[in-house]
Image: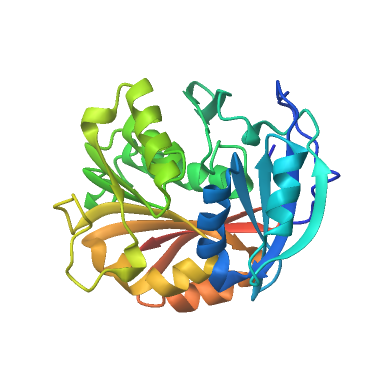
Amino acid sequence: MLLNHSSTASDVIGPLACPRMAWLLTLRTPTDQVEILSSWLWDQGTSGIFERPSNDVQTELVAGFDTKELAQRVRLALPRVATAVDLAPAPPAEHWVDPTHVVDVALGPDQKFQLRPGAAFGHGGHPTTRLTLELLARRHNDTLIPQLATSQTAMSQVLDVGCGTGVLTIAALLLGASHATAVDVEPSAIEQTRSNLTTAGLDERATVVLDDVSQLTPGEHLLGADTIGYDLIMANVLLPVHQAAAQIIADLMAADGELLTSGYLVEQQEQILESYSQLSVIASVESEGWAAHRFGG
């Protein structure tokens, strides 16, 4: 499994064995500096990053490195927005720092698909991903029940905000979406999402976009995409990203569309509800201190 919000880099365990030694550098930074610091870490050669909210204003980043020497060099060169918390060898179980590893992602008792996490976040095991997949599956199941099936449960056009590895994009397509647009600000995420879509044979039904949703203006299209009214939007991103992009995300929804959100702690739910106050809550779920919501227009 990935780190959870109460773990430290030195006490994480999980079920997946990594074929090479890796080192985990844990950093603390103001939440509004996460994207800047993450980009810097990718430039320094990290093989994976996990974001772990510390509180409303601080976030911990755990970055994986192939060697101790590289991790130490990065630690010594940290920008002023980052504070080093811990440097420790990764247990063999930490597969998210191995870009060659393949994992199975379950959509239900009878359906699963394979995913290569690479250097992007999202292998299906983190609570926020599992919660979003749960809400997605519930929504899909609604379409199978005549009394619950409405135009709101259609999935003609889907948008995945902060796609990471493309796990949610692939899940939506496998559950019947006609087309999906996956967007992320990290080039490594775009590359990995495209690779996973191709492996799954779904690349012709998806558009992968390097863009920042929070920087769009009302009515503006995502780069390379020509859809504004999405039937379903999925946003598994940190609280500050939700707060910055909530209005834009709501504007990108179809009139009868729905939104699945996660990436935040249970105690941050009120701030999420405030950010999406123009929408109505259909359902919410929680796991291991994390929360996810399903909103309707």
The answer to which quarter of the image holds residue 217 is bottom left
**Where does residue 283 sit, x and y in percent of width and height?**
49, 58
Q: Which residue lies furthest to the left in this view?
A: 226
76 lies left or right of 143 = right
> How has the structure been colored for display?
rainbow
Front-lying residue, 210 or 245: 210
| Whether residue 143 can be seen here | yes
In the displayed structure, 197 sits above or below 266; it is above
Q: How many marks?
A: 0
Q: Would you place residue 219 above or below residue 70 in this image?
A: below
Of all residues shown, which one is farthest toward the right? 11
Location of the C terminus (image quadrant): bottom left
Q: Where is residue 147 in the image (x, y as percent from the top left)?
A: 31, 45
Q: Where is residue 83 in the image (x, y as percent from the top left)?
A: 73, 66
Q: Which residue is drawn at 27% across and 69% down?
A: 216
Q: Which residue is drawn at 73% across and 34% down?
A: 22
Q: Which of 100 and 279 is in front in this view?
A: 100
* Rendered view: 74 above or below 13: below
For the point 58% across and 24% down, the residue is 101
Q: Where is residue 236 in the image (x, y as percent from the top left)?
A: 48, 54
